[in-house]
Image (tube, rainbow, N blue to C red):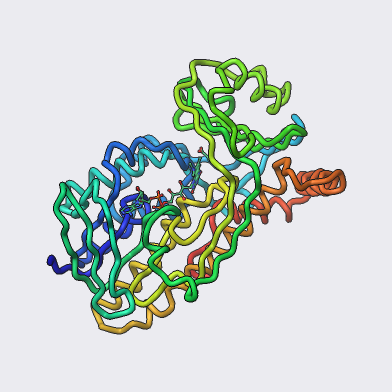
Amino acid sequence: MTRIQVAIIGAGPAGLFLGHLLHRQGIAVTVLERRSRAHVEGRVRAGVLEQGTVDLLHALGLDQRLRHEGLVHEGTKLSIDGEIFHIDFRGLTGGATVTVYGQQELTRDLYDAAAAHGLPIVFEVEDVHLDDIESAHPTVSYRKDGTTRHLACDVIAGCDGFQGVSRKAIPAVAQKTFERAYDVGWLGILADVPPVDPELIYCRHADGFALASMRSPTRSRYYLQCAVDECVDAWPDDRFWDELCRRLGPQMADRVTRGPIFERSVVPLRSFVTEPMRHGRLFLAGDAAHIVPPTGAKGLNLAASDVMILARALVHFFKTGSESGLDGYSAQALARVWKAERFSWWFTGLTHRLPNMDAFARKMQSAELSYIRSSRAAQTTLAENYVGLPLDR
Ligand code: RFL
Ligand code: PHB
């Protein structure tokens, strides 16, 4: 039995950020990850970091590559049936911006720093079990290379994503879950071609949503709304480019550079929250506790804000023995989570063609988009939610 202070389940953004925040305070942690490092680094996911997430990397001293390679975006574009207008984040929010930096890059930076600073991560663990989470001395068991090992700890942080084991360790009677399925998906691709525009373009089109994003000045990331069970093989390169151009509209279509598509995947859109984010000495953070549809670019940023709150509470606990911060964690994290859930739900409904929308709902959508286009107040609401709400409000 190895004795530590905090066992962290999952080495995605939530687990890695938390691991670094605690390790640098001298707290004994071990991070357990089901997959290999190469597998986690290879997953193509989020692309947009709020200022708070950028600041967290900076505070950890891990932002050297981000400062060189991250693309600062001062605004975004909305396309309504091919007509484009600009939302000026910086001007509307008093200076806030977001940074385009792929989750793959962020994960690589956090893994490199873990190796450099001695943050222990055990990859490819199997059969992770959480025990005695209602006591002050929970344990975690897992199998590595055929041998079962045990960690005795004070606290377990469940950072193992939506499919992880941590949330399932909480008795059903102690949890309340809230869920919405949108019955649509996003087909996402990568291609080594220059992005169609220096900014992201969120497109509402009669046949469905599209998003033009990027990873670098030479790598584009594009998404098309599709069926939840869409088969990627049904989308050869030409079909994807043709449909993207159609949804972007003639003004942008001429500027699209086509090229070989080397990554394709479909992700279902879903909202999910479990309350509370704590049971006994188990604390959930990130996707383990909540999911948002990717429209608002909030998932990774919520993982970061959860663990900022959790790390503060844990440092206080280990320094003073007081559980006051731990007792407040769930409520404080959820206050921010629900606002991001609301924004992601709203922005999804504003820009997608959802199966339950009738002609009236589509008219409402058009009217709201037209209002946003003409109203600085409405644009400010969008901008301040997109760049990220403060941690403590
Ligand atoms: P993760 O990243 O899923 O990491 C959880 C880790 O736990 C491991 N694991 C286990 N480890 C040990 N034992 C077990 N039993 C385990 N079970 C699972 C997993 O292997 C994994 O490594 O959760 P985390 O850390 O909470 O981070 C959340 C983010 O990854 C997620 O919210 C974002 O990717 C969501 N997201 C976006 N978020 C943004 O902020 N901005 C975006 O632009 C954005 N775009 C996206 C997205 C997610 C997408 N997909 C594919 C879901 C775009 C897409 C397409
Ligand atoms: C991405 O680049 O992957 C991305 C950007 C913005 C979103 C979602 C995904 O809202």
Residue 212 visible in image: no
66 versus 380 height, above or below: above
Q: In which quarter of the image is residue 201?
A: top right
In-image side of 357 versus 306 (left or right): right
Q: Quadrant of residue 218?
A: top left
Residue 358: image location, x then y, percent: 83, 45
In-image side of 110 versus 75 (left or right): left
Q: In which quarter of the image is the C terminus?
A: bottom right
Residue 187: image location, x then y, percent: 57, 33
Report the residue at 61% width, 20% height from top.
241
Report the residue at 53% width, 32% height from top.
188
Q: Give the mark count.
A: 0
Residue 100: image location, x then y, percent: 47, 39
Q: Which of 34 and 28 is in front in this view?
A: 34
81 versus 347 height, above or below: above
252 versus 40 height, above or below: above
Report the residue at 57% width, 43% height from top.
268
Q: Quadrant of residue 14?
A: bottom left
Report the residue at 14% width, 53% height from top.
147
Q: In which quarter of the image is the N terminus?
A: bottom left
Q: Nearer the viewer, residue 295 or 181?
A: 181
Residue 211: image location, x then y, percent: 61, 35
Residue 97 visible in image: yes
